[in-house]
Amino acid sequence: MSDGTAATVGTVLRHTAQLTGGRRAAVRELLDGAFGGDFSDLDFEHALGGTHALTYEGDRLVAHGSVVMRRVAHRGRSLRTGYVEAVAVRPDRRRRGLGTAVVAALERVIEGAYVLGALSASAEGAALYAGRGWRAWPGEIGVLGPGGPERLAQEEGSTYVWVPGGGVLPGEGPAGRLDFDWREGDVL
């Protein structure tokens, strides 16, 4: 079609190990373009090792998101958490429901494999997640860093969680703290 719109749009799930050949390079190219060049090598590393939701128009990658396993300490428990990373839509394909399709696919993965879903939402992305039932965590956010637990006050209000089936975490409340496992670069 002359306007660049493909007749077929589809989202598929693939593990990082299946992103062979040019697929991984296409994901990186999409992310670099969608984030205006503000997507580092460590950001890309954080998006690998789990399941990717890839949305195509024909054979052209137009949207991406991934979910990777993280451990989150909450009230004495270590929760297997599906952490959402690198949700992005090509700038010329935004506001067409592609981000929603990616997040819906990732939620199915979380529902089948994890106790909790979590992510760090940008101001622009928060409405997408809130509209799907994700909610800003009401308590403190921290990390189990190399020097021990550290509070990440700057992440409070932008860290969203999703409990499969609409449930709640045991003991959840304003005083509950989530401590994420450590990683290089942006911890969340």
Image: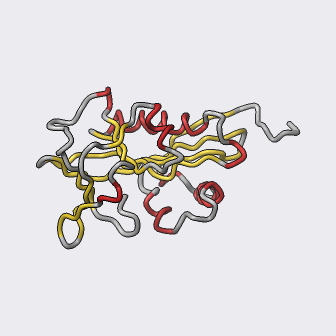
Q: Which residue appears at 35% of the width and 42% of the height?
A: 136
Q: Which residue appears at 58% of the width and 57% of the height?
A: 24
Q: Nearer the viewer, residue 92 or 71?
A: 92
Please state if 136 lies on the left or on the right of 76 as rendered: right
Q: Residue furthest top?
A: 165
Give the x, y percent position of residue 174: 21, 42
Q: Quadrant of residue 93?
A: top right
Q: Which residue appears at 55% of the width and 34% of the height?
A: 101
Give the x, y percent position of residue 132: 45, 31
Q: Nearer the viewer, residue 74 or 154?
A: 154
Give the x, y percent position of residue 123: 49, 48
Q: Quadrant of residue 150?
A: bottom left
Please state if 187 lies on the left or on the right of 147 as rendered: right
Q: Residue furthest left?
A: 76
Up/down of 52 relative to 42, above or below: above
Q: Quadrant of residue 23?
A: bottom right
Q: Residue furthest right?
A: 2
Please state if 75 lies on the left or on the right of 103 as rendered: left
Up/down of 89 relative to 26, above or below: above
Quarter of the figure with the N terminus = top right
Q: Nearer the viewer, residue 66 or 35?
A: 35
Quarter of the figure with the C terminus = bottom left
Give the x, y percent position of residue 87: 52, 48
Please state if 143 lies on the left or on the right of 53 as rendered: left
How is the model colour-coded? Answer: secondary structure
